[in-house]
Image (cartoon, rainbow, N blue to C red):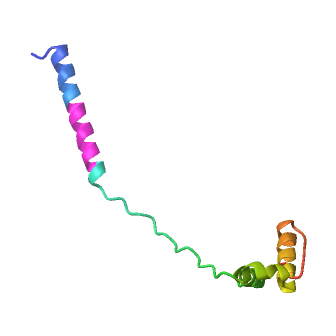
Amino acid sequence: MMDGKMLARLAAVVFVTLAITATAIDMTRQDEAPPTRPAPVVEPSIDPLGAEQRRCQRLGERAAGDAECMAVWAETRNRFLGRGGEWAR
């Protein structure tokens, strides 16, 4: 006859076997990935102020004497400080 200890061991072995089997089935199952939407493509807008800043940058030290570059730098400061201006968006 089976005594209480033997029955408890048998139940533990059955439980562990079921747990291992369930884990193996879960690990081998391949979940279907949810469909992903492509990210929207955002076309960068052309910033005329940025183009002028690059032009002034290429001028180097001569830009300090260029009236247009001085205006560009003033507009850049105004935009940075939150003031409106000619190139304000």
Of 27 and 47, the residue lying toward us: 47
Instruction: State whether residue 30 is above or below residue 7.
Output: below
Identify the residue shown where x is 82% and y is 73%: 76
User: Residue 22 magenta-drawn?
Assistant: yes
Of 43 and 1, the residue lying toward us: 43
Q: Position of residue 51 (x, y in %)?
A: 73, 84
Left or right: 10 as drawn, with respect to 70 = left
Q: Position of residue 35 (x, y in %)?
A: 46, 69
Span of residues in magenta: 14-25
Left or right: 27 as drawn, with respect to 34 = left
Q: Position of residue 44 (x, y in %)?
A: 66, 81
Quarter-of-image position of residue 50: bottom right
The N terminus is located in which quarter?
top left
Instruction: State whether residue 74 is above or below residue 30.
Output: below
Instruction: State whether residue 83 is above or below residue 21.
Output: below
Of 67 and 9, the residue lying toward us: 67
Quarter-of-image position of residue 89: bottom right
Instruction: State whether residue 75 is above or below residue 6.
Output: below
User: Residue 41 magenta-drawn?
Assistant: no
